Amino acid sequence: MGMRKKGDLPSKDCVCCGRPFNWRKKWEKVWNEVKYCSDRCRQNKQEAKKPTSP
């Protein structure tokens, strides 16, 4: 693949906070499944799905 400039990397918007984030090497094989910019957003999204007691 060679060296790429940061501006050339693909980016997405986080489904939790809406902030844009760039491709990372560790996501190379799973980029299509990445939805969150951070572990914090991923955990917050999971907590939001839990039913709350009245």
Image (spheres, rainbow, N blue to C red):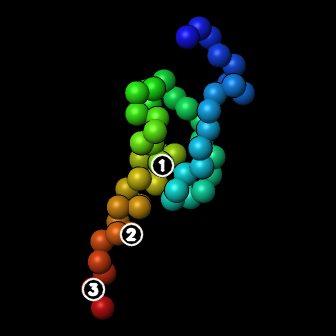
Q: Amino acid at mark 3?
A: Ser
Return the disc, 1 or 3, that comes first in the chain's sequence. 1
Front-most of 1 and 16?
1
Q: Which residue is mark 3?
A: 53
**Contact (CB < 8 A) between labels 1 and 2?**
no
Mark 2 secondary-structure assignment: helix
Q: Residue at x 27, y 86 (%)?
A: 53
Q: Residue at x 44, y 31 (%)?
A: 27
Q: Amino acid at mark 2?
A: Ala
**Quarter of the image that includes the N terminus:** top right
Mark 3 secondary-structure assignment: loop
Residue 42 image offset from top left, x and y in percent: 41, 53
Q: Which residue is mark 1?
A: 36
Q: CA distance from mark 2 to mark 3?
A: 13 Å
The local crowd at label 3, few if under 14, some if 14 to 19, many if 20 or more residues have their Cα within 10 Å, is few
Name the outermost residue toward the top: 2
Mark count = 3
Q: Which residue is mark 2?
A: 48
Q: Residue at x 51, y 59 (%)?
A: 16
